[in-house]
Amino acid sequence: MADADDQTVEERLKAALWFSVGKIVDEEALKLGVNASPQFIGALTELLWTQIGNVSEDLRAFARHAGRKTISTDDVLLLTRRNEDLAKVLRSCLKR
């Protein structure tokens, strides 16, 4: 039963991501005067879904390596170690 519930939650999350990506792409396409195909939106959604999965696994591994079960802001900052601009934005948000 838990597997079916997990799958339902995953499907709902992916559908919500698809909707949000589609909305953003449609807004930007209108601004630029271009068309975006449903295939493009689907491909972008799959790319984001995979990236979200990778990021979540990395964060989980960082926390586990530190002997914690909870992901901390330090883990997120460690994740941004190769993207200095993103790290600066996140650090400035933390200072607030």
Image (cartoon, rainbow, N blue to C red):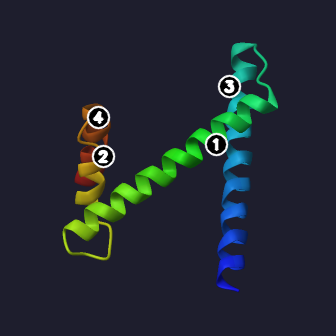
User: Which of the marked residues, 3 or 2, is nearer the chain's N terminus?
Assistant: 3
Task: Report which quarter residue 26 is drawn in.
Answer: top right
State how far apart marks 1 and 4 are (Cα): 22 Å
Residue type at mark 4: give it. Answer: Asn
Say which residue label 4 marks.
83
Residue 28 image offset from top left, x and y in percent = 68, 25
The one of 24 and 64 positioned closer to us in this rendering = 64
State how far apart marks 3 and 4 are (Cα): 25 Å
Relative side of 16 to 35, left or right: left
Which mark is on residue 28? 3
The residue sitting at 42% across, 51% down in the picture is 55
Residue 84 image offset from top left, x and y in percent = 24, 33
User: Which of the marked residues, 2 or 1, is nearer the chain's N terminus?
Assistant: 1
Mark 2 surroundings: few (<14), some (14-19) or many (≥20) residues within 10 A? some
Say which residue label 1 marks.
46
Using the rendered image of the protein, determine whether residue 96 is visible from the camera's viewpoint: no
Residue type at mark 2: give it. Answer: Leu
Mark 1 surroundings: few (<14), some (14-19) or many (≥20) residues within 10 A? some
User: Which of the marked residues, 1 or 4, is nearer the chain's N terminus?
Assistant: 1
Relative side of 66 to 8, left or right: left
Say which residue label 2 marks.
90
Residue 48 image offset from top left, x and y in percent = 57, 43
The correct choice, above or below, for 94 with respect to 51 in the image is: below
The one of 35 and 31 positioned closer to us in this rendering = 35
Mark 3 surroundings: few (<14), some (14-19) or many (≥20) residues within 10 A? some
